[in-house]
Amino acid sequence: MHATSELTSSKRVVLAARGIDKAYKRGPWPARRMLPVLADVNFSLRQGEVVGLVGENGSGKSTLMKILVGALAPDAGEVERAARLGYCPQTPQLYERLTCDEHFELFGHAYGIDSRREREARHSIYVALGFERYARVRVSQLSGGTVAKLNLGLALLADPDVLLLDEPYAGFDWDTYLRFWDLVAERRISGRSVLIISHFVADEERFDRILDLRDGRTVPR
Ligand SMILES: Nc1ncnc2c1ncn2[C@@H]1O[C@H](COP(=O)(O)OP(=O)(O)OP(=O)(O)O)[C@@H](O)[C@H]1O
């Protein structure tokens, strides 16, 4: 793990969750019961931190991520967002008939970025992740790995202060995996924060902190 984690502890908190509970309804009526997934989760992310949230399949990682970004309401607890967030969901929310370029244009409009800045950002994302040659290819014709690059690229487009990534490197080849970590390291140096959730962590030294999600709670490793 990075030696600077003590340094970052003096930095401001950009995202915090306190006392988060979440349960889902399960099973057919009338045998419906509540399945508790998160129980009193407390979490914070500081400026310039790269944090891993690790847990086995079904442990509630995506549920917590959705609550952190505001896509899902918790049953109890609160989330404080003190910076601009970018979110890369586990299942890409893309349009089959649109090309990569068209996605960047569409998301650029949605983020309110002017078209010159959007084109510059798009170009550097293509170069950083190595998929410029697919710029004019429709999503329906892209490989799974390229879809994952586009999904990540769209989260990067508005240059958010905090990047929340749900299983970002699952479909990446080795070269892209290394490019991904270069990109994360650059963001870290420039004071931006990254939260990565995954069911496995191969390179612990790339993170400032790793938290395990176990029995509905986050436990520092
Ligand atoms: N909308 C839903 N309704 C009912 N149960 C749900 C719903 N979403 C998730 N669950 C259940 O909540 C638990 C946690 O799911 P979640 O997707 O948060 O886990 P995860 O740690 O991200 O899993 P994975 O590593 O497989 O992606 C699982 O048992 C899942 O089946």
Image (tube, rainbow, N blue to C red):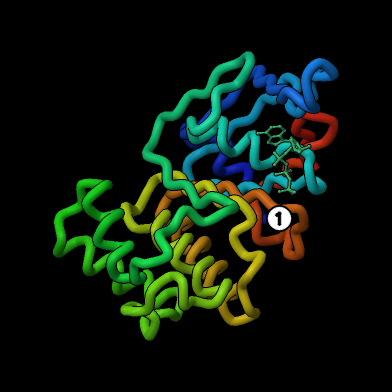
Residue beneath the point at 63% across and 14% down: 76
Instruction: Examine the image and state in which quarter residue 136 appears.
Output: bottom left
Q: Residue 99's quadrant in the figure?
A: bottom left
Q: From the viewer's perspective, tell me whether residue 42 is left or right of residue 83.
A: right
- Ligand 1, seen in the image, is in the quarter at top right
Q: Is residue 210 above or below residue 220?
A: below
Task: Please give the residue where the numbered disc 1 appears in the rendered image.
Answer: 1
Q: Is residue 196 left or right of residue 201?
A: left
Tell me where residue 153 appears, x and y as whole percent: 42, 63
- Going 44% across and 66% down the picture, which residue do you hit? 150
Near-viewer residue (98 or 12): 98
Residue at 49% in and 35% down: 69
Residue 195 in the image, given as x and y percentages of width and height: 57, 47
Q: Is residue 28 visible?
A: yes
Does residue 4 show up?
no
Quarter in which the C terminus is drawn: top right
Q: Element under label 1? A: loop
